[in-house]
Amino acid sequence: MRTVTPQITVIDVLATLNDAESGRRGYILSGDKSELKRYNVAIQLIDPKLDKLRKFVGNNPNQQQRLVKLESLLDKRLVLSQQSINLYQKGKFSPATQNSLANTLSQRNLHNIQQVIDQMQFEEEQALEVWVNESQSSIQSRMLIEILGTFVTFVILFGVYAQLYRQMMKRQKAEILQRQLLQEKELGELKLQFFSMASHEFRTPLSIILGSSQLLEESLQSQIEKQKLKNLYRIQSSARLMAQLLSDILTLARAEAGKLEYKPELVEMQTFCLNLIEDIQTLSEARHSISFDKQGSSTHAWVDEKLLYSILSNLLYNAIKYSPERKSIYFTLKSEPEAVTFYIKDEGIGIPQETITQLYEPFQRGNNVRGILGTGLGLAVVKKCLDLHQGEITVESVVGVGTTFTVIIPQKMRN
């Protein structure tokens, strides 16, 4: 059976390369050594990912040839990147040199890399189409067998227990209930498989769209006024929104299917919160300050770091989204032996009282959002992730004044 994993790995290589390029440009533009470190870390990740990709295409001569070509193009791109860093460190990096390298990196080399990736994607998509057709045929066969088996079982039971009508009716009800539960479970698994496949398929073009628009922005920002690049910013914003939507839908599907993993570990909470704030401020285009305060006597807590990140990032993004620009967001951590508590307060539009009880349902939003973009999935994801922690969430809000969300995660079971 063929899968689409190689296709995802190719895009992963491209995304890592884009991350390296962003670090390189950040270092050259600002002189920040953390950007250089980011560049070096990304470069070190490329070879392992290429090794992984090489294993996936091991039995495909066409893909092997394309991979060899891709590796050659990547080597050239990395050489050019290192040359620009060396020139900058020697003080010989002029605007003319910068333009020459940018043209080389983002035009000819990037075009060739993209062409190879498109060819590899096309071949995998053809394999995927064959796999889907085979799967559909197999599903139809299984459904027919199940229907025939159910019918035969019913006839046998009716003949054997004709004189025990009441008992048979009870057994039938039990069987119907069990079948419904089984069907619901199978449906949940099928939904999860579908959303997983759809998410992976959509992330591929979204990554290309976002990466390409960022490269185009970086190529044009020295030549065109920032205000005239607003359409590029809209593309990037829409791509990020779509990626978040896919992530939220996949999380909800996993939760409904009982496949959302919960792996608690001991986490240093202040460092976790500060890193989260840094991520939010880096990715958010809105101009808001996030004020952080640490309270309590404990330093660590038992949590699932990935799920907690999803909980708090959704709440912080909502606080930013529904607050006017330059308004402050207040993020408070209270860590005690019995429980760890988070308070996220904004000075935004607030939530009407009549809609608060429906906030945690998918696709539910306040009736005062007034065209602010959103999917209505963020708080549903928060609730699913928090349920696995056996935690609780409360909200206090006044329309036009602001909103405060309180998240409590108990720690008694770990002490």
Image (cartoon, rainbow, N blue to C red):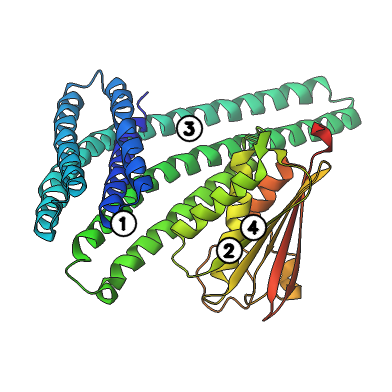
Nearer to me, 320 or 372: 320
The mark found on residue 140 in the picture is 3
What distance separates the C-alpha of mark 4 from that of mark 3?
Answer: 37 Å
Q: Amino acid at mark 4?
A: Leu
What distance separates the C-alpha of mark 4 from that of mark 1?
Answer: 37 Å
Residue mark closest to the camera, 1 vs 3: 1
Q: Which residue is mark 2?
A: 290
Give percent across and percent down for residue 214: 29, 57
Label 4: element kind: helix
Q: Which residue is mark 4?
A: 379
Q: Which residue is mark 1?
A: 30
Residue appearing at x 25%, y 38% in the figure: 121
Give percent across and percent down for residue 266: 68, 33
Q: Amino acid at mark 3?
A: Gln
Q: Is residue 44 visible?
A: yes
User: Mark 2, residues whose alpha carbon is within 10 Å: few (<14), some, or many (≥20)?
Assistant: many
